Image (spheres, rainbow, N blue to C red):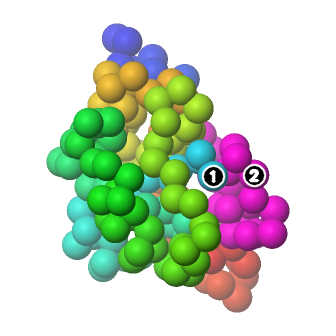
Amino acid sequence: MFRLSRYVLNYISIDKVSKIVLAKQDKANQNETLQHTFIIDVRSTHEVQTTGMIPTAVCIPLPILETILDDEYMEGEEYFQHFAEDDPNHHNNEDQEVFRPDKEKSTLIFYCAHGIRSAAALDIAAQLGYKHLYNFRGSWAEWYATYHDPDEKKIV
């Protein structure tokens, strides 16, 4: 029952996710809160390559999520190599700091194809001690349905 209630209570809407994406895309208006807000796609890399992903998100497939979020797994340089060097939003700016999620102050927003795996991801992160967790239940399906046409919707 606890899992279901956390799944329902930690829901984030597409409107809020859209506002976060727009704010993260505005490089001139960055702040510490935004730098510690992570949109995490837990679908497989094949799914992401096939369909795309939400701008500013990082792909950490569900089967490896626990290992990646565990503080003892990756040191800073290794984390940077995995999540910044290939990140199109990083722009290869060596002065730009890459934050790894912090259990106390980071906000993690999980999504997948339809919200099921992202709910499991939320449970994994909670078990690891992360405090600020959200499940974008509409996930990729809702995002794509809303923003797939760049001529109509300007966020993508």
Instruction: State which quadrant residue 58 falls in.
Output: bottom left
Q: Position of residue 113 (x, y in %)?
A: 36, 57
Is residue 105 positioned above or below 95 on the image? above
Question: Magenta part of the protein: which range?
Answer: 10-34
Q: Position of residue 128 (x, y in %)?
A: 33, 26
Q: Residue furthest top?
A: 1
Magenta residue check for 19: yes
Residue 127 seen in the current view:
yes
Give me the disc on residue 63. Answer: none
Could you tell me the amino acid type at mark 2?
A: Asn
Within 10 Å of the Cα at label 2, are there few (<14), some (14-19), or many (20+) other Cα atoms? few
Q: Nearer the viewer, residue 88 or 55?
A: 88
Residue 117 seen in the current view:
no
Q: Position of residue 135 (x, y in %)?
A: 48, 39
Could you tell me the amino acid type at mark 1?
A: Gln
Magenta residue check for 85: no
User: What is the magenta segment's predominant secondary structure?
Assistant: helix
Give me the disc on residue 35. Answer: 1
Q: Are marks 2 and 1 in contact (CB under 8 Å)?
A: yes
Give me the disc on residue 31. Answer: 2
Q: Nearer the viewer, residue 133 or 30?
A: 30
Residue under the image location 75 percent in, 52 percent down: 31
Q: Nearer the viewer, residue 136 or 131?
A: 131
Instruction: State which quadrant residue 55 falls in.
Output: bottom right
